[in-house]
Image (tube, grey):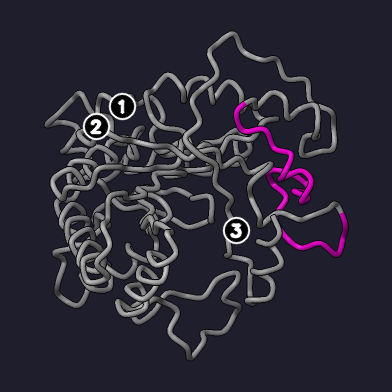
Amino acid sequence: EESCILTQLGSGPDASDEPQFYSVADFVEILKYAAARNVKVAPEFNMPGHARAAVVSMEARAKNGDDSYRLMDPEDETELLTVQFYDRSSIINPCLDSSVRFVVKLVDEVVKMYAEAQVNMDVWQFGGDEAKNILLGAGYSAYDLPKELPFSKSPACIQKMQEDPTISIDTDAANYWALKVNQILAQKGIREMMAWEDGLNGMMKEEFEIAEVTVNFWSTLFWGGTDVLVEASKTGFGVIMANPDYLYFDFPYEVHPEERGYYWGTRENSVAKVFSFAPENLPQNAETSVDRDGNAMNITTPVWPAPVIKGMQGQTWSETVRTEAQHQEMTYPR
């Protein structure tokens, strides 16, 4: 992968002759189009996980002689497996100075595009989710595979933790990187940072330089979502409901063999189910829906003040969507 990223899932097995990316002009046009219709475009560059395109691209750049933006420690021998079944080449190493330079450059370039479109960029979606080794999960306990924490064999991270014993990058890589990126965003005058809920696990709003921090809440109801929401409400972060079992539009409409879509969070998200979702009273949804296996749910309303919900967000994840017609079908009318 020194000239391109290998195709995967929705891209099909063959590389297309058409560019598989947005140009600067494309993005500026999108910003102008959205602004004219009172729609805010929030850029999301997921990191440190889900960043394989960036990591592999910058690795190819380093092999061509420029390692100023390198995102992978070449001496790191950590063995891991991500949710998408990649190795450490899909997670940005947070201990490298070159990783910091990459984010600074990235933010600067995105800010320039907003400026060209004459649109204010006041929010940045950090991502932060799933920067982990799934082999450490219970589902792989019986397999004789390496069970190593991310970056646990990275010389750069080992040195960083020796210099500052208060940080534990191998266990809290996303948390450590969230604060680093937050500092950069604050310096650039961006007033709000967003992240997926697990990217800021165990953190509090007071730790961040930016005054407004928001999490996308994506825990399923049947996997203890109510309790996770209570903990999220204690952090001081804003909360946007993005629950997979009600608001993921890459799931089937109905339980039927001809329906397309993933089903890890629910077997179906019908139009009726989506539109009857009660975001401000999460336990109530157990009365109108079932769990992933079709069983009734018994959810106890916690003795805790109802969290303040900042908003709600529907997601059409498109990695298995191959055509515009499929995209339209999965997204609308949900």
Q: Amino acid at mark 1?
A: Lys
The answer for how far apart the CA atoms under marks 3 and 2 are is: 30 Å
49 lies above or below 293? below
Q: Position of residue 186 (x, y in %)?
A: 18, 43
Say which residue label 3 marks: 316
Q: Check contact, mark 3 vs mark 1: CB within 8 A.
A: no
Q: Position of residue 48 (x, y in %)?
A: 34, 49
Q: Amino acid at mark 2?
A: Phe
The answer for how far apart the CA atoms under marks 3 and 1 are is: 29 Å
Q: Is residue 192 left or right of residue 14?
A: left
Say which residue label 1 marks: 205
Q: Check contact, mark 1 vs mark 2: CB within 8 A.
A: yes
The answer for how far apart the CA atoms under marks 1 and 2 are is: 6 Å
Q: Quadrant of the N terminus?
A: bottom left
Splitting the image into 4 quarters, where does residue 129 fall? top left
Between 250 and 280, the residue placed more toward the observer is: 280
Q: Which circle's residue, 3 or 1, is located before the other in the chain?
A: 1
24 lies above or below 142? below
Q: Amino acid at mark 3?
A: Thr
- Residue under the point 33% across and 35% down: 213
Main SS type for the magenta part? loop
In the rendered structure, which segment of residues is drawn in magenta?
256-280
Q: Residues within 10 Å of mark 1 (few under 14, many from 20)?
A: some
